[in-house]
């Protein structure tokens, strides 16, 4: 098998188009994971058992089952209940919900690391629960967990090829289609690998910078 | 809200034979307070009256319930039994349909405004400047205008000797300086009762003095009711109108510092004082 430069250059633009879809799916999925993860973390910390127990059980269930199974479930089973969306939206929701169960654990660790004295001082000063959480607790809980959250962004990004299973036209799906038409898989798949590598490296650098920035903020 | 007669407020030399100045309505009244953590009884049917503007030192071995009493008054712990009144109003209960029912969050928040607390571990907000630590609650809880809160915070920080540190962050300050900021932060809410929970126990020995001197000034200049849990017997003697000796969740002995320190009646008090004064 010999590397065919002409063919590589021919498929590159299509793969770059698909890269945009991949990045979009990863970013939207990540945003869902960030928001939903916080809600799950808060629900599990809640003293109300009717809330914390079912949410905890559901989160454990989602975290303990494969993302691919969940994607198939959303894609093939939900339409049977009359819920119909595009493959992209289905995939993004699948990614986001799956990873929310992980980010929830990250938030939990961050919240647990805030000393109890901070809650007590806020209580003694009569802050409302919302103000305590938003202005006292979160600013201390989040910076230490930013690197871990960043790693989950990269993990989500690397899981986007699973969306090809439900016909989303992300990079992997496009590469497979191209390969199946020409029976030349080497070039498209290699390019896909390289593009994943490049984007992951860029993300890692950006996360590192954000981390440094927050570290500086914490030290002043 | 009661209006203490001038006589009560301006009586620095209390009748030392009584637990509280005669005729004064108590600022704080603990009645039959019980608190247990699991099988460990921390407060055992405790009664205590505190007069307006009285300075009371709580001493005793660790685990004897002193800190828990402060925490129950700060509403950080809920008592298992008993009642607390601040200036005649129930703290953990509220009136409803002619009776008393357990207080809801709103009632507790309202009552908590009377009380400020300084903690052993300072508990300053590490992500906020010194100034913002002091202004955050007045602005967001009391709704005071930001400029006014700033001006008042600067005055308070001046009072505790930290005018030049307003823009520093807690991590840049020594323990003693952090604790003085914490005192200013609590005072900024204009509480009528201030609680000090072993506020010098986490400090380096050389910074204990600066914190005690701030508390001493407060005791002299302000009409605050002050409760202080302390292991500094020398300071308790000079600061307090009354010293209460705690043992196993009860007050075994109380009285003016001169009497309690020079002539303790109870065996346990004698043993405790011997132990702490020898060390």
Image: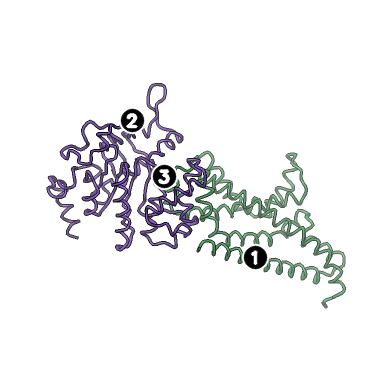
Chain colours: A green, B purple
Q: In which quadrant is the N terminus of chain B drawn? A: top left
Residue A206's disc number: 1
On the picture, is B209 further left or further right than B161? left
Foreground tag (2 vs 3): 2
Task: From the image, tell me which residue sits under label 2.
Answer: B2
> Dot 3: what SS?
helix
Q: In which quadrant is the C terminus of chain B drawn? A: bottom left
Q: Is A24 in front, or is A61?
A: A24
Expressed as whole percent of the image width and height from the top left, the position of residue A82 reads 75, 39
At horizontal 55% and vertical 59% (from top left) the residue drawn is A143
One can see residue B21 in this view:
yes
Neighbours of disc 3 within 10 Å: few (<14), some (14-19), many (20+) = many
At horizontal 59% and vertical 50% (from top left) the residue drawn is A37
Expressed as whole percent of the image width and height from the top left, the position of residue B155 reads 42, 50
**Mark 2 on the same chain as mark 3:** no
Q: Pointers 2 and 1 in contact (CB under 8 A)?
A: no
Res A207 → quadrant: bottom right
Residue A124's disc number: 3
Foreground tag (2 vs 1): 2
> Dot 1: what SS?
helix
> Dot 2: what SS?
loop
Return the chain for callout 3: A
One can see residue B46 in this view:
no
State which tag comes first along the sequence, 1 or 3: 3
Return the chain for callout 1: A
At horizontal 53% and vertical 52% (from top left) the residue drawn is A138
On the picture, is B88 further left or further right than A88? left
Neighbours of disc 1 within 10 Å: few (<14), some (14-19), many (20+) = few
């Amino acid at each position: 098998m010999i590397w065919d430069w002409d063919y590589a250059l021919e498929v590159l633009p299509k793969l770059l188009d698909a890269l945009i879809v991949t990045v979009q799916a990863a970013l939207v999925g990540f945003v869902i994971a960030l928001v939903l993860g916080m809600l799950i973390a808060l629900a599990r910390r809640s003293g109300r058992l009717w809330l914390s127990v079912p949410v905890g059980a559901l989160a454990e269930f989602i975290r303990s089952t494969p993302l691919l199974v969940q994607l198939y479930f959303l894609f093939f089973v939900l339409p049977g209940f009359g819920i119909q969306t595009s493959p992209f939206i289905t995939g993004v929701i699948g990614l986001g919900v799956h990873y929310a169960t992980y980010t929830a654990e990250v938030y939990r660790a961050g919240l647990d690391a805030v000393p109890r004295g901070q809650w007590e001082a806020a209580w003694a000063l009569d802050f409302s629960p919302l103000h305590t959480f938003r202005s006292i607790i979160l600013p201390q809980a989040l910076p230490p967990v930013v690197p871990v959250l960043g790693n989950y962004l990269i993990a989500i990004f690397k899981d986007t090829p699973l969306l090809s299973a439900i016909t989303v036209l992300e990079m992997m799906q496009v590469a497979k289609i191209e390969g199946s038409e020409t029976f030349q898989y080497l070039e498209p798949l290699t390019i896909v690998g390289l593009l994943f590598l490049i984007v992951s490296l860029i993300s890692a650098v950006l996360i590192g910078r954000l981390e440094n920035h927050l570290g500086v903020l914490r030290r002043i | 809200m009661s209006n203490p007669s001038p006589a009560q407020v301006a009586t620095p030399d209390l009748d030392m034979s009584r637990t509280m100045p005669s005729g004064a309505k108590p600022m704080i009244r603990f009645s039959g307070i019980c608190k247990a953590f699991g099988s460990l009884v921390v407060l055992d049917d405790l009664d205590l009256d505190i007069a307006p503007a009285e300075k009371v030192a709580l001493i005793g071995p660790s685990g004897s319930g002193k800190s828990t009493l402060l925490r129950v008054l700060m509403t950080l712990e809920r008592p298992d039994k008993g009642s607390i009144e601040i200036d005649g109003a129930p703290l953990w209960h509220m009136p409803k349909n002619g009776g008393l029912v357990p207080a809801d969050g709103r009632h507790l928040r309202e009552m908590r405004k009377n009380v400020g607390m300084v903690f052993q571990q300072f508990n300053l907000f590490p992500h906020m400047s010194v100034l913002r630590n002091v202004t955050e609650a007045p602005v967001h809880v009391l709704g005071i205008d930001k400029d006014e809160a700033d001006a008042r915070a600067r005055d308070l920080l001046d009072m505790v000797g930290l005018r030049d540190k307003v823009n520093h962050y807690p991590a840049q300050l020594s323990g003693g300086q952090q604790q003085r900021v914490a005192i200013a932060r609590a005072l900024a809410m204009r509480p009528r009762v201030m609680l000090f929970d072993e506020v010098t126990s986490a400090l380096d020995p050389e910074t204990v003095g600066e914190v005690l001197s701030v508390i001493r000034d407060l005791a002299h200049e302000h009409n605050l009711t002050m409760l202080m849990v302390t292991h500094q017997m020398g300071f308790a003697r000079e600061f307090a109108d009354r010293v209460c000796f705690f043992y196993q969740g009860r007050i075994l002995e109380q009285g003016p510092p001169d009497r309690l320190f020079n002539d303790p009646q109870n065996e346990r008090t004698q043993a405790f004082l011997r132990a702490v004064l020898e060390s």
